[in-house]
């Protein structure tokens, strides 16, 4: 437990910052939130979602999440958004063992689609690739049959986040894991298709960014370069700002590295540095600077 006086929002922010690299620490931080919940009912829905993502999605601990939901249910009674999040969480737990339960769900289509996310993510921790793919396919079918833009957006977020998670934890040895590679790339492709139906140019551009990086880590340099170029072209066609173009160039630099094109990678890296100087927002500049430093460290491009 953390003895420092704090707020529920601070607890959630701390846990979400910790969870990619230290999920057990994130779980311990979220435990502090139960005592703070009565004073911050407006954060209840976010708290439920954070517990779901860490306990179920990252820890693959359905029992712990079910216990958390039982603890939360009385505290969020009468709060519509939080009650909906609890119901969605219970469906996510059920989907781990009974995928067809979604067909009987009384939740709105977008919420039923969202319930698939952390269930599918939990299955990635087991490398249960056919089951992950089946849940993603089912979520896609639900979104399509609903005809609702909100369900398409939920599908786009679901598939983008699965692709991004698999990419974040992807190592060189994983290139030999055909199921992992297929699941990651399929999710990224589905995200792009969903954003084409339900998003704007920036969502599609960022989906190409995701595809470029996923192909790059998978060692598929030619495909990575093609998606990175599409990302950059869409930025240029729509007058994107320096920050957006910086990350399009990052995708291209990583793609060139994957394609064993060091000269092009260095030239692209230098364009990133030029764009960085144009980013005025302090926080955005700091994040972009860290991205450039990480690229230089990883590939020795500076």
Image (spheres, grey):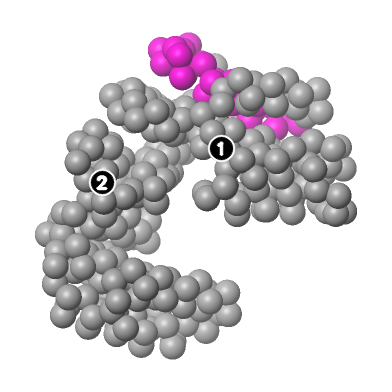
Quadrant (top left, top right, bottom left, bottom right) of the C terminus: bottom left
Residue 4 located left or right of residue 184: right
Please tell me which residue lies in front, 19 or 196. Answer: 19
From the image, tell me which residue sits under label 2: 173
Q: Position of residue 50 (x, y in %)?
A: 62, 40
CB under 8 Å between discs 1 and 2: no
The tag earlier along the polypeptide, 1 or 2, is 1
Front tag of 1 and 2: 2
Residue 94 located left or right of residue 139: right
Residue 29 is drawn in which quadrant? top right
Q: Position of residue 107 (x, y in %)?
A: 55, 22
Residue 118 located left or right of residue 71: left
Segment tinted magenta in the rendering? 77-105
Q: Is residue 60 magenta?
A: no
Please tell me which residue lies in front, 87 or 234. Answer: 87
Residue 84 is drawn in which quadrant? top right
Q: Is residue 85 magenta?
A: yes
Q: Which mark is residue 53?
A: 1
Q: From the viewer's perspective, is residue 118 above or below residue 272?
A: above
Q: Main secondary structure of the magenta part?
A: helix
- Residue at 63% from the left image edge and 26% from the top image edge: 65
């Amino acid at each position: 437990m953390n003895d420092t006086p704090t707020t529920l929002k601070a607890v959630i922010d701390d846990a979400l910052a910790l969870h990619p690299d230290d999920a057990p620490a994130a779980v311990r931080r979220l435990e502090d939130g139960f005592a703070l919940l009565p004073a911050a009912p407006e954060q209840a829905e976010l708290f439920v979602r954070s517990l779901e993502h860490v306990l179920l999605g990252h820890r693959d601990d359905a029992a712990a999440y079910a216990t958390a939901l039982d603890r939360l249910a009385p505290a969020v009674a009468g709060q519509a958004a939080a009650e909906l999040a609890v119901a969605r969480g219970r469906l996510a737990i059920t989907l781990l063992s009974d995928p067809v339960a979604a067909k009987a769900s009384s939740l709105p289509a977008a919420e039923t689609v969202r319930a698939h996310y952390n269930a599918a993510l939990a299955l990635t921790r087991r490398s249960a690739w056919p089951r992950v793919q089946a849940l993603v396919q089912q979520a896609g079918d639900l979104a399509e049959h609903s005809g609702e833009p909100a369900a398409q957006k939920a599908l786009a977020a679901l598939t983008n986040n699965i692709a991004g998670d698999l990419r974040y934890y992807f190592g060189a040895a994983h290139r030999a894991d055909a199921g992992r590679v297929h699941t990651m790339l399929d999710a990224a492709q589905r995200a792009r298709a969903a954003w084409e139906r339900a998003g704007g140019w920036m969502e599609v551009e960022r989906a190409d960014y995701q595809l470029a990086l996923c192909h790059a880590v998978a060692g598929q340099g030619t495909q990575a370069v093609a998606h990175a170029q599409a990302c950059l072209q869409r930025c240029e066609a729509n007058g994107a700002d320096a920050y957006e173009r910086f990350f399009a160039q990052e995708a291209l630099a990583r793609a060139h590295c994957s394609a064993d094109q060091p000269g092009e990678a260095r030239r692209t890296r230098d364009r990133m540095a030029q764009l960085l100087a144009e980013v005025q927002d302090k926080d955005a500049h700091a994040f972009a600077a860290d991205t450039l430093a990480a690229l230089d460290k990883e590939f020795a491009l500076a």
